[in-house]
Image: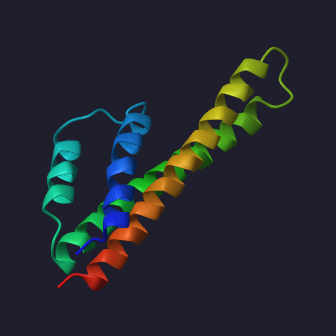
Amino acid sequence: MLTRRQLLFVGAAVPLLTSRASAHEPHGEAEAEAAKMVEGAKTPADHAALAAHYGERATKARADQAHHRLMAQAYSGKQGTAAGRLHCRRLANEYGQIAEEYEALAKRHDEAGKSAS
């Protein structure tokens, strides 16, 4: 079972993650399903499923981060492309932060699953 602290963390992080992630992923069935999973998470299997879900989201965000880092490098040294370079750097940083938050959620659910009965 989640502790009060863990519930507060998840409750605070999910809206932040979904609002930040909405820039690259539309809300839809997957997000509705994730919300149901969070609300009903009680067993180790429930938390393992959430940890896997957030791990997948972190992996996607890391891939997006790497893509934008590569694009920022591609824009480097090209005349008149400073805006593109800055755009890609900002997105790379944002995706890095998103990945860190998803990784933290995955870890919390992994830990919650170990303590759930």
Q: Report the colour scheme.
A: rainbow
Residue 57, position in %: x, y? 39, 54
Nearest the eye: 2 or 72: 2
Q: Quadrant of the N terminus?
A: bottom left
Using the image, determine if residue 101 lies above or below residue 46: above
Residue 41, position in %: x, y? 17, 66
Left or right: residue 88 versus residue 30 is right
Q: Residue at x 36, y 65 (%)?
A: 6
Left or right: residue 29 versus residue 26 is left
Quarter residue 8 falls in? bottom left
Quarter residue 73 falls in? top right
Residue 114, position in %: x, y? 30, 84
Q: Residue at x 27, y 71 (%)?
A: 2
Using the image, determine if residue 41 lies above or below residue 17: below
Q: Residue at x 35, y 36 (%)?
A: 25
Left or right: residue 66 versus residue 35 is right
Quarter residue 102 falls in? bottom left
Residue 39, position in %: x, y? 16, 56
Furthest-front residue in view? Answer: 4
Q: Quadrant of the C terminus?
A: bottom left
Figure disc tally:
0
Q: Residue at x 13, y 61 (%)?
A: 40
Using the image, determine if residue 29 lies above or below residue 76: below
